Image (tube, rainbow, N blue to C red):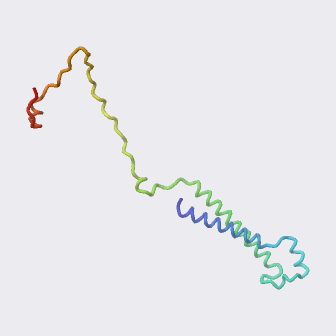
Amino acid sequence: MNWLHTATIVFHVLIAAAIVGLVLLQRGKGADAGAGFGAGASGTVFGARGSASFLSRMTATLAALFFASSLTLAYLGGRKPEAPKSVIDRVTVPQTQEAPPAPTTQQVPADQPVEAPASNAADDAQTGQPPQQ
């Protein structure tokens, strides 16, 4: 997972939490009837209708950002993974070559004695051993 994907997930979760908080702060439709008769809402920071329009605008803005981050996560999730970053992942296994076929041995019938191979004088001179008899 790259850093952009991680940052987008964190941004997405924070927006989701902010949307939940803003929805919980808003009043229901039944609370508007009391504000119309002067139920003390005119003395608030945003005025009689200011808080409702501000919170609803902020909710709509966060919903648009949530939608955009959802599309971004879908795009990032569908991309192919990057090249390996570990040195071990970059090592390629060499292609194995086929071994030459093993020499065939002659089958000696059981009734014939097996002879020792003939000794070569040049081989004996290289090894420093006396010739075998």
x then y, percent, for residue 22: 74, 71
| Res 28 → quadrant | bottom right
Work out whether 128 lies above or below 113.
Answer: below
Residue 30 position within the rendered picture, expressed as x and y whole percent measured from the top left: 88, 71
Image coordinates for residue 94, horizontal then vertical, percent: 36, 45
| Quarter of the image that includes the C terminus | top left
Residue pictured at 65% horizontal, 68% vertical: 14
Foreground residue among 51 and 117 = 117
50 to the left or right of 104: right
Q: Name the residue located 79 percent from the left edge and 79 percent from the top edge.
A: 50
Q: Is residue 83 left or right of residue 58?
A: left
Query: Which is more toward the observer, 125 or 37?
Result: 125
Q: Is residue 39 above or below residue 102?
A: below
Image location (x, y in percent) of residue 24: 77, 70
Q: Residue at x 57, y 61 (%)?
A: 5
- Residue drawn at x 87%, y 74% is 32
